[in-house]
Amino acid sequence: MSEAIEIIVQPGTQYGLRLKNEEVLPIGRTRYKMVKELWAALSFIFITLLLDVIGLSIVGPVFPRLIEQLIGGNISQASQWSGLLLFAYAFMQFICAPIVGNLSDKYGRRPVLLLSLLGFGIDYIFLWLAPTIWWLFLGRIIAGMFGASFTTATAYIADISTNENRAKNFGMIGAAFGLGYIIGPVLGGLLSEFGPRVPFIAAAILTFINVIYGYFVLPESLPIENRRPWMMFVFLIPYCLGG
């Protein structure tokens, strides 16, 4: 259970895991009692990043056909709308990434990651049930807002990594991206043979399963004493960088 362990930081020590009422177990140690719990948390982060990337790439083979049905147009018009939908997702992710990261600094990584994944599941339901093209836009906007979990997932890995395993743990991020961009289009193409909305049903089911999995296995990595207050103007960061 998530309450069974906590990831803590003690002054002058490495990050570590501990069981309630037991001694701190440094993460750098190769043998310790909580190795299964640590790998469960890392596997959740990997799956979350994987689903983020799949959520972006799965729409490629599916959207033109679905949009064509919704607008009653031809494939050329559908492709244009598909590009706009991809832009809506990427733009909202760009805007919301610093906000989501700041929320995780204030409230902890665990709740932000779980809520981000839950938002992705809601997006897939919107795409599945969409009666008009504007429902697709709303779903993609929601996905972009919550899909900014990459920032929080990266911070989580930084929290639990030591100098010895930092490169390996961050390499997992690259693996999730590479695998997601392979699985997404293939999964979208295969499942779309049964209907243009079927990939979204499958993606929603997988996402909600991962939310439940994370609820039970994901410990908090950021101690309360290390959390930072909310930065009111953090939403201006993307505009400053863009300007």
Image (tube, helix red, strand yellow):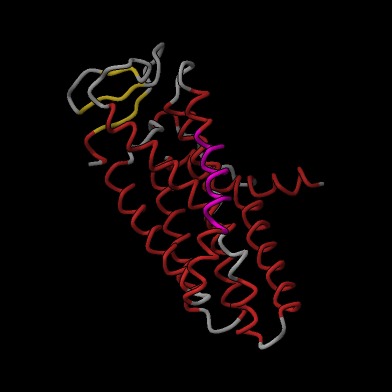
Left or right of residue 29, residue 58 in this image: right
Toward the top, the furthest residue is: 12
* 11 is higher (above) or lower (below) than 51: above
Q: Examine the rendered structure and indicate whether residue 146 appears above or below residue 151.
A: below
Quadrant for the N terminus, please: top left
Identify the residue shown where x is 48% and y is 52%. 51
Asked whether residue 156 is drawn in magenta, I would say no
Query: Residue at 70% across / 77% down in the picture?
Result: 78
Which secondary structure is most common in the magenta stretch?
helix
- The residue lying toward the viewer, choosing from 142 and 172, is 172
Q: Position of residue 123 (x, y in %)?
A: 50, 66
Horizontal side of 113 relative to 76 (left or right) equals: left
**Percent coordinates x, y for residue 159 in the rendering:** 45, 28
Magenta-highlighted residues: 172-185
On screen, 6 above or below 48?
A: above
Q: Quadrant of residue 26?
A: top left
